[in-house]
Amino acid sequence: MVGSVPLVWVLTLAAGLFCIGLFGALSRRNIVGMLMGIELMLNSVNINLVAFWRYLQPTGTAGLIFAIFTIAVAAAEVAVGLAMVIAIYRARLTINADEIDTLKG
Amino acid sequence: MNPIAIGVFIVIALLTLGSGIMVVTVRNIIHSALWLIASFIGVAALYLLMEAEFLAVVQILVYAGAVSILVLFAIMLTRQVTGEGVRVVFERWWVALLIALGLFGVIVPTLWKHGATWEEAAKLAQVGPAPVEGAANSLQVATATEIGRSFMGEYLLPFEVVSVLLLMALIGAVVIAYEERTRRRRVLTLAEELALKKRGIVEPRDAEGAVMPREAEGKVILLDSEQA
């Protein structure tokens, strides 16, 4: 893989996935859809970390460890986020972000 | 240059990006979650291709296993009706598209500008320490053993901190999603709903057809089974 596929290709793939996730997070009305976009963005960051580790410092562990921390933080984020989605649905009976506008005044 | 590796990479890249696009474009949110699983598996295959086996397994377990099931549960618990006329994206979704495309247009030229530098650095990094004459490359890519050693040595404090973070997230999720017993909604079975219909009681429903909590109406309708 390292001898055949240039690092830039992998980084371009990650950039594409990040932008797809960004579009999903910004455009979806459904809060769960937004969270799914954020998950895609976190995954693309992980691809970057692993690619830089494998291509530039394969004997060290810093890139892998950082990727594992990102996964742990993402898991915590999605657990709290989905609990909030359920709490919001209970209070407002909707999970469309544009209908939850109590603070709009 | 190994054409098989290039081919496998391109297939995995297309799978990952294609499922990612499906995640953000399909109307049905459950289909969206299923495409998300496909995208996660594509990323795990990419990790395998980059010889990060441990991370690939973690990716499958945590993302394709736990996170996606959590997302599916949240979707099913919030019963969002996605009919034909219901909007799934904001009215100004094209602004989001412009932002995403603009960011892509900034990142990619920057990456390709520095591509040659990285390529040289990568070539230097792929040589093991003091290669023996005539022997194969002695490069030792870090494995799960080294990851475990690092966690118990150099990264011990961050490791403990992240475990506290996970505990906090666990408690926080329970506290946020907790519902007082007296306010809990009853989910009617099909038989109970039929019995209510026979007695001419119509369940209060909101605009999208979901059953409203009866406590919100200030009255509690007794079911046959509860009266007995």
Image (cartoon, coloured by chain):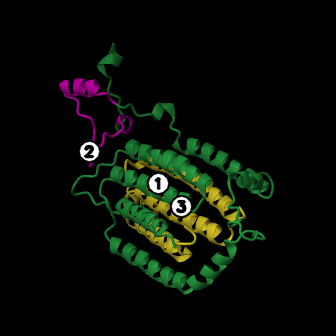
B69 up-or-down from B113: above or below: above
Please name the residue that numbered disc 3 is placed on.
Answer: B49
Q: Secondary structure at mark 1?
A: helix
Chain letter, green:
B
| Residue B41: mark in rendering | 1
Q: Looking at this view, is A89 or A48 the one in front? A: A48
Q: Residue furthest front?
A: B134
Residue at the location (46% across, 44% down)? B69
Amino acid type of disc 2? Answer: Gly
Chain letter, yellow:
A
Q: CA distance from mark 1 to mark 3?
A: 12 Å
Residue B70 in the figure: left or right of residue A93: right
Residues at discs 2 and 1 both on one chain: yes
Q: Residue furthest top?
A: B228
Q: Quadrant of the C terminus of chain B?
A: top left
* Part of the protein shown in magenta: B188-216
Q: Looking at this view, is A48 or B180 the one in front? A: A48
